[in-house]
Image: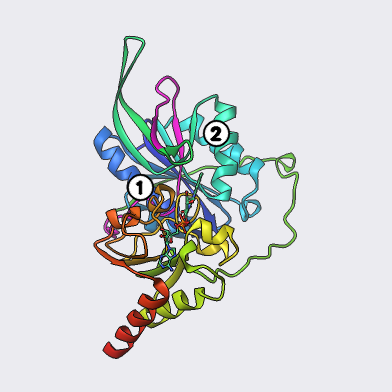
Amino acid sequence: MRAENSVMVYIQQEGGKTAEVSLELVSKARELADELGVPVSAALFGEEVSGEVPRIAALGADVVCLVEDPRLRFYTPIPYSKLMIRVIKDYKPQIVLYGATTGGRDLAPRVASNLRVGLTADCTDLKIGDHTQKDREYRNILYQIRPAFGGNIIATIVCPEHKPQMATVREGVMRMNAPDNTRKAEILRLPASLGEGDFPTEILERVLEEKTVNLKGANIIVSGGMGVGTRENFALIRSLAEVLGGEVGASRAAVDAGLIGKEHQVGQTGTTVRPKLYIACGISGAIQHRAGMDASARIIAVNTDPEAPIFSIAQYGIVGDLSEVIPRMIKACKARV
Ligand SMILES: Cc1cc2nc3c(=O)[nH]c(=O)nc-3n(C[C@H](O)[C@H](O)[C@H](O)COP(=O)(O)OP(=O)(O)OC[C@H]3O[C@@H](n4cnc5c(N)ncnc54)[C@H](O)[C@@H]3O)c2cc1C
């Protein structure tokens, strides 16, 4: 099995561990590749990263283009983009996907400008379809779908004339497949072939801030918006989250107003979440907020305004003041434990 014409995923890794968004993208690539009848390939670079191949294969990759070199321990733009460009030129995938992470957003434009191909940033969906342009019909091209104009429209972008078609994709929006541990991937082990001049910068020390909020992994999220009113009132949201064993989320307006930290933000420019239960308190339900939470299995909304748009996607709506409703919810939850 070779990587030609494949759907390729750039595998982002940190300390030898694959980023979750890359695993989500391998799952999505599998779906797209099945529709196209082509293989899924993965580009994996790092120091000692071959141990990740089984995980990537289990989610759908057929081929892994692997480069291992101690100098690739940490992502730096020049060597990584050189390798990615070389892999794409050699194996000619028709689609290449990157996570819209800081690293993916740094790497993908460098590759796109070198190869003179298009790149759509921050996609929230990908599909295969046909496209007609100036009487010319393009079959089976990649629809790169993302919110545009401040989230007021959903745009479908195509780059039919140049291959590969490339996109960065938001974290958390693609569903991860259930792993099939019987799947195996062919490893194409490639030499780094990089000179000292390809490493103009040296990383002397890395300081990683510990993540204190895990919105993506939470089964229950209690989110507060501008209706919470003050930083102190967020204690109510935190208490409800605590009794339910959930995480605390927030709208961007609440974050911008300094009511809570940015790491709690849910939405188009925050984290995309899909918990079993999402409780939106004092959140109007603007499209940019909904884009990050409307795939939640159950939504409860608490809002004083019966016309608030959040009610249109909530399975349960409570019209009322959150300062009265939430204490009653906490009391009821405590009574059940
Ligand atoms: C490019 C772009 C990206 C964006 N990205 C995001 C994003 O990622 N996430 C996000 O959330 N937003 C985002 N926004 C902002 C978004 O458009 C909204 O402005 C924001 O979501 C509104 O937040 P809110 O619902 O908390 O505030 P508001 O719209 O002010 O709503 C407050 C709600 O609280 C209710 N309320 C008031 N008092 C009470 C009370 N005592 N009890 C109960 N309810 C009460 C009100 O009826 C109202 O519905 C983005 C905007 C743009 C342009």
Q: What's the mark number on residue 86?
A: 2
Q: Is mark 2 on a helix, strand or loop?
A: helix
Q: How crowded is mark 2: few (under 14 residues within 10 Å), some or many (20 or more)?
A: few
Question: Along the line of sight, which residue is nearer the eye, 227 or 141?
Answer: 227
Quick check: 192 above or below 180?
above
Observer able to see residue 3: no
Q: Where is residue 182 in the image (x, y as percent from the top left)?
A: 26, 58
Question: Along the line of sight, which residue is nearer the eye, 231 or 105?
Answer: 231
Observer able to see residue 231: yes
In magenta stretch: residue 175? yes
> What whole-number distance in Å separates the C-alpha atoms at marks 1 and 2?
20 Å
Q: Where is residue 47 in the image (x, y as percent from the top left)?
A: 58, 56
Furthest residue to the top? 135
Question: Along the line of sight, which residue is nearer the eye, 306 or 279?
Answer: 306
Find residue 129 and report its image quarter.
top left
Marked residue nearer the N-terminal end (1 or 2): 1
Callout 1 amino acid: Ala
Q: In the image, 166: left or right of 45?
A: left
Q: Where is residue 175 in the image (x, y as percent from the top left)?
A: 33, 53
Q: How crowded is mark 1: few (under 14 residues within 10 Å), some or many (20 or more)?
A: many
Q: Which residue is tagged 1?
A: 61
In magenta stretch: residue 110? no
Residue at (34% x, 86% y) in the render: 331
* Majority secondary structure in the magenta region: loop
